[in-house]
Amino acid sequence: MFIQTEATPNPATLKFIPGKPVLPGSTRDYRSASEAGESPLASKLFGIKGVSGVFLGHDFVTVTRRDAEWQQLKPAVLGAIMDHYLAGAPVLAGAATANTAVDEEFFDEDAGETVKTIKDLLDSRVRPAVAQDGGDITFKGFKDGVVYLTMKGSCAGCPSSTATLKHGIENLLRHFVPTVQEVRQV
């Protein structure tokens, strides 16, 4: 098994691509070992000293480091991912399924078509680009012209995430959806 690695715009994260599906159609973002109980893979990664975050994407795993250097941490992470896949262990255990992590969304009933357009734009134009950088972005809500989004994986805490939101995503949404006035991170 060969696992590729890619740098991300966030220097504290590294993207690992095992060449196999991780969570098709869904993502999970764990910020602590206690949150990762549903995932044997994430739990194993949190067992490595220096790991402070694990993001499971469609076909990649993004790991965030705390106070370790990648030259020491990377071999341990590669070994844990390889061992997990070679053992044939599931990415999510027990009753956890890839579609159970649906957060509550908020928006006015009369904004349904606008929200559908916003979600379509996010899914078709934004999420693929963000996934290439080892993260994800999800719609949280729309109220009074403000779109609320959640940044996950390498995008959470990334120095350039504010610029991505304000200059990239906000401009895109304002262009296609005139009622959008602002984009904010939740």
Image: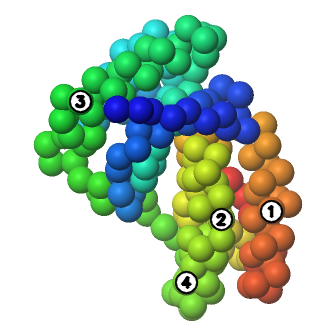
Q: Residues within 10 Å of mark 1 (few under 14, many from 20)?
A: few
Q: Is residue 45 left or right of residue 107?
A: left
> The residue tagged with tag 1: helix, strand or loop?
helix
Q: Earlier in the sequence, mark 1 or mark 2?
A: 2
Residue 126's tag is 2
Q: Earlier in the sequence, mark 4 or mark 1?
A: 4
Q: Is residue 27 above or below residue 112?
A: above
Disc 1/disc 2 C-alpha distance (Å): 9 Å
Tell us which disc is closer to us: 3 or 2: 3
Q: Is residue 16 left or right of residue 38?
A: right
Residue 116's tag is 4
* Label 1 sits on residue: 168
Q: Earlier in the sequence, mark 4 or mark 3?
A: 3
Q: Is residue 180 above or below residue 167?
A: below
Q: Earlier in the sequence, mark 3 or mark 1?
A: 3
Residue at image point 55% right, 33% down: 5
**Residue 101, can we see it?**
no
Task: Give how far across and how far down residue 102 sits, in percent.
Answer: 38, 60
Residue at image point 56% right, 65% down: 139
